[in-house]
Image (cartoon, grey):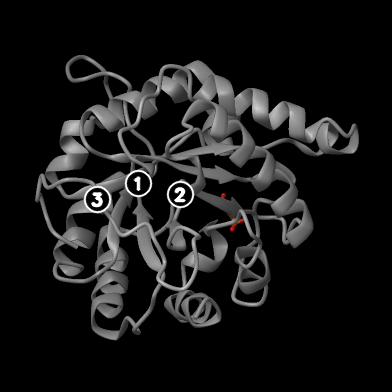
C-alpha cells in the first residue's frame, strides 16, 4: 500500500478471466490487537504475503492505523478503518475524521457494521452520512447491511435488507464502480459459527445487485458485493464462487495470519 498518497481511488475492478469484479477480501479486526501486536502482524503480512489475484484490505482499529500503515508500506494490501465520523472536523470528542484517516493512507472504511448499528444506535441515515463523508475524501465506504434472525425467520429478510440498503445509500453518489463496496452480513451469522449457505448469500447478493442497477445503472455490474458472517478458509471458496458474491468481510478468521493465507489460497 501507499501511505498518504492522496492518489485516485482506482483499483483494478475487472478480472481477466471473467466479467466479475476482482474479489475483495476485507479483514475486520474489530476491537482486537494492540498497536504492538498489529505491527507484528502487518510486518509478517508484508514479508509473507503470497501471490494472489484477490485484493486484500486490512480494516484495523483507529489506534493501530499508523503502525499498520508503516509496516505494510510497499505491500499490495490496502489499509482500512472500521468507522468514520460523518462530520468534517471540530468538536466531536472521540471521533475520527475522514481527513485523519486519509492522512495515514486509509483506502477503505466500514460503515454501518451491525455492531455499530446495535451498540451505537447508528441509523441508515447516519450510515449514508458517513458513506458520503468518506467519498468526499476519496475513501471507499464498505456499506454493511443485513437482517437479524427474527426477520429471516419471518421470511422478510430480502425486503428488509433492500430497504436498509436504499436508505443507507440515500444521496450517496459515485463516479465509478470502484467507489463503493456493499457487504451483506446477516446478523445471526456474525461471530456465531453459523454461516449462511452459499445459496442464501447469492439470493441476497443478487437482490442487492438488482437494487444497485436502479441506483447506479452504469456501475452496478462491477460494484463489489461481499458476504460476511463466519467466513473461514473452509467455506470462502463456495461463497465467493457465487455469481453475485465478489468477496468477503471476515472477522474471527481475520485475526490469525495463517487463516488469512488459507482464505487467499482457497480463492485462487
Ligand atoms: P465474523 O465477523 O467473520 O467473525 O462472523 C464478520 C463481521 O462482523 O464482519
The residue mark sitting in front, 2 or 3, is 2
Quarter of the N terminus within the rendering: bottom left
- Label 2: few (<14), some or many (≥20) within 10 Å? many
Using the image, tell me which numbered label, if any, was put on residue 149.
Answer: none
Q: Position of residue 95 (x, y in %)?
A: 29, 28
Residue 198 in percent (x, y) is at 74, 61
Q: As displayed, is residue 137 above or below residue 194?
A: above
Q: Which SS class for mark 3?
A: loop
Q: In this figure, which residue is indicated by the disc labeled 2? A: 222
Circle 1/circle 2 CB separation < 8 Å: yes
Q: Quadrant of ligand 1?
A: bottom right
The residue labelled by disc 3 is: 10
User: Residue 77: x and y, percent?
Assistant: 29, 66
Find disc 1 in the rendering and name its residue. 178
Mark whose residue sits in front, 1 or 2: 2
Q: Is residue 161 left or right of residue 51?
A: right
**Marks 2 and 3, Cα distance to the nearest angstrom?**
13 Å
Asked if residue 211 can be seen in this view, the reply is yes
Q: Earlier in the sequence, mark 3 or mark 1?
A: 3
Residue contact between numbered discs 3 and 1, judged by CB atoms under 8 Å: yes
Chain-order first, disc 2 or disc 3: 3
Frontmost residue, 170 versus 252? 170
Mark 3, Cα crowd under 10 Å, few <14 / some 14-19 / many 20+, is few
Image: 113 above or below 48: above
Amino acid at each position: 500500500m501507499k501511505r498518504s498518497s492522496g492518489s485516485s481511488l482506482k483499483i483494478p475492478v475487472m478480472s481477466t478471466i471473467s466479467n466479475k469484479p476482482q474479489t475483495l477480501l476485507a479483514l475486520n479486526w474489530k476491537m482486537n490487537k494492540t498497536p504492538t501486536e498489529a505491527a507484528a502482524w502487518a510486518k509478517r503480512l508484508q514479508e509473507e504475503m503470497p501471490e494472489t489475484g484477490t485484493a486484500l484490505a486490512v480494516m484495523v482499529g483507529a489506534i493501530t492505523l499508523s503502525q499498520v500503515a508503516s509496516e505494510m508500506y510497499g505491500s499490495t494490501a490496502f489499509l482500512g478503518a472500521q468507522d468514520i465520523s460523518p462530520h468534517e472536523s471540530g468538536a466531536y470528542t472521540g471521533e475520527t475524521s475522514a481527513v485523519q484517516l486519509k492522512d495515514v493512507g486509509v483506502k477503505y472504511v466500514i460503515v454501518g457494521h451491525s455492531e455499530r448499528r446495535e451498540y451505537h444506535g447508528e441509523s441508515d441515515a447516519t450510515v449514508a452520512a458517513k458513506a458520503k463523508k468518506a467519498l468526499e475524501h476519496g475513501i471507499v465506504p464498505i456499506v454493511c447491511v443485513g437482517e437479524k434472525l427474527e426477520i429471516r425467520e419471518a421470511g422478510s429478510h430480502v425486503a428488509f435488507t433492500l430497504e436498509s440498503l436504499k436508505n443507507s445509500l440515500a444521496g450517496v453518489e459515485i463516479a465509478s464502480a470502484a467507489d463503493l463496496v456493499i457487504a451483506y452480513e446477516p446478523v445471526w451469522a456474525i461471530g456465531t459459527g453459523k454461516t449462511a449457505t452459499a445459496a442464501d448469500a447469492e439470493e441476497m447478493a443478487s437482490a442487492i445487485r438488482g437494487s444497485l442497477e436502479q441506483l447506479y445503472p452504469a456501475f452496478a455490474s462491477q460494484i463489489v458485493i461481499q458476504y460476511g458472517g463466519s467466513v473461514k478458509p473452509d467455506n470462502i471458496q463456495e461463497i465467493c464462487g457465487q455469481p453475485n458474491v465478489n468477496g468477503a468481510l471476515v472477522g474471527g478468521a481475520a485475526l490469525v495470519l495463517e487463516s488469512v493465507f488459507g482464505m487467499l489460497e482457497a480463492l485462487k
